[in-house]
Structure formats: C-alpha cells, structure tokens
Amino acid sequence: MTRVAAIDCGTNSIRLLVADADPATGELTDLDRRMTIVRLGQGVDRTGRLAPEALERTFAACREYAEAVKEHGAQRLRFVATSASRDAENRDEFVRGVLDILGVEPEVITGDQEAEFSFTGATRELAGRTDLHRPFLVVDIGGGSTEFVVGDDRVRAARSVDVGCVRMTERHLLADGAVVDPPTEERIAAMRADIEAALDRAERTVPLREARTLVGLAGSVTTVSAIAQDLPAYDSAAIHHSRVPRARVREISDWLLRATHAERAAVPSMHPGRVDVIGAGALVLLSVMDRIGAEEVVVSEHDILDGIAWSLV
C-alpha cells in the first residue's frame, strides 16, 4: 500500500485526506479526513481577486494540514485548487503561500480535470454494485462551479460551469453585502434562471439525460441528505450512499430558501459555514434532478478528494 495525502482547495472549503491506498483491492483506508470552511472565493465573482482575509484563512488551514501530513508520514502529497483560484487575478500570491507552507505547488486545474477526479473518486467503489444502472452522471456542486460527468467505467463527457452555492448566493441573494433573509420570489426566480442557463451550456457537451444513476457530491448534497434523514448530527457513515427522492429534495430546497438564517442554523447537521449558501446549493441539485428526470440522487462522501488520492498511486 501507498500512504498518500490529497488536498482539495475549493471556493468555499479546503479539505485534507491522508489515506493508505491499495490498488489491488481498489480501497482507500482513511487515516485523516477533515474539512475547513475558508471561503477562499469570497467576493471573487465581483472583484476578480482573492481577498487578503480569505487568503489568510486558507493559509491558516494549510499550516494545520502540513502538521497532519508530517505526523502521518505520507509518502506523496498533491494539492489541487479549483474554481476560485482559476478565476482570480492574484492567484500567484495564493500559489506562493501554499508552496511556502506545504512544500508543493498547488495545481490550478481545469474544470475538465476537476470533473475527472470527481468521477473517479465517486464511482470507483460503485463498480461492483448491481442495483445501480449505468451510465452514471456525477454532479459535484462546489462553491464556485458545478462539474457534470457522464461515464461508465471511465469518463465519456465532462463539463464545468460557473454555478456553485457561493457564486449563486453572492450573485442573487445579497443586498448591501448581507444575505437577504429570506430572499424574495423574484430573487429565487432569477437564480433558477441562471442555473437553467448553466444546465443548457452543460448539455451542449454532456448528455445529461442519458444517465441512469445520478450521483451527487460535495457539501450541499451531503447536507441535503442529512436534513432528509433528520440526523441529530452530521454523520458521514449515514450519509454515504444514502438515496434521497426528488420530492424530498424539492421540499428541503423550498424550505431552505424560505427559512431565516436562525432557522437554517438550528439544523443540527448544518455546518456553520454552509448556513447562508445551502439554499442556493440545494436549488442547483433540484434543478439538475428536474432537468434529467432523476427520481433520486445517490449521495457520495467520496469525491474529488478521493480521485486526487488515487492519482498519486
């Protein structure tokens, strides 16, 4: 086995996985899996730059992760950066900071590369399942972008579009720098129209409607699953490979978009960093399900992070 460390730095969160990888069995054994909300993409859609305070939050998390990687004795480390750092004018400042702290340069990957990692991480352990039909559509709803990947054993088509929970919140649900609580019907309609336009773009290159199984990834989807199950706390084991019907996703999305900040924050499985952006993320998921006619979503806790880990083996 090979001990590897993978870091995925997205628009809303930065995550670490240290694991032992066994290519013979296709299994990853987690030694350390953690997530920190750093909101690196704060304001990027508006300013085109990474904010100084967002960079410092991210670097603080990197220092913690550097200690964990050293403690576990990982043989290889890969740091992948996604949507926010692709878009920012001052991404060189981000690259230098990560290199100084972790000793590796962050790879600012393309949306297509991001999609391939997500597909590998989400589907590698589903290969032997007889109750799930192929092809899979893997949908990774991030903070700044959403990746769509259709494939069987390997990727057939992939597309990344700039629709994520943070980007949609900042574009449609802010007034005077604060989240409208709750948003008006007009704001929700405008956000839905933006998402539908992004789905139109994705469908030009990815045959979304050919999918037989929808697999949903990342914090917006896993939080919707936790709410659907009425979990008393966030429970990865209960969430991983759970199935949420479209009707339940619709109920949850409608409630999240009409609830107050305090009501959303009171959900016991809700991470504090997702309270203001979860409504937008849930609406992206619902819009995808409506578009392809999916009756349920299979929720995976394994995603781009696991795909990055496998790329090191």
Image: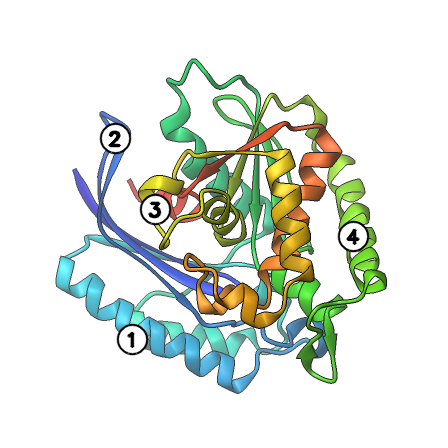
Vertical arrangement, residue 92 with respect to residue 19, above or below: below
- Judging by the rendered image, the residue that carries numbered circle 4 is 192
**Which of pointers 2 and 1 indicates the residue nearer the eye?**
1
Seen at 50% across and 61% down, the residue is 10
Quadrant in which residue 295 is drawn: top right
Marks 3/1: CA distance?
25 Å
Which amino acid is tagged 4? Arg
Q: How is the image coloured?
A: rainbow
The residue lying toward the viewer, choosing from 110 and 167, is 167
- Judging by the rendered image, the residue that carries numbered circle 3 is 236
Circles 4 and 1 in contact, beta carbons < 8 Å: no
Q: How far across and down, in percent of the image, does residue 240 sit?
A: 38, 39
Marks 4/3: CA distance?
29 Å
- Judging by the rendered image, the residue that carries numbered circle 2 is 23
Q: How far across and down, in percent of the image, does residue 225 sit?
A: 48, 44
| Residue 275 visible, this orientation | no
Q: Residues within 10 Å of mark 1 (few under 14, many from 20)?
A: some
Marks 2/1: CA distance?
30 Å
The secondary structure type at the circle numbered 2 is loop
Image quadrant containing the N terminus:
top left
Q: Residues within 10 Å of mark 3 (few under 14, many from 20)?
A: few
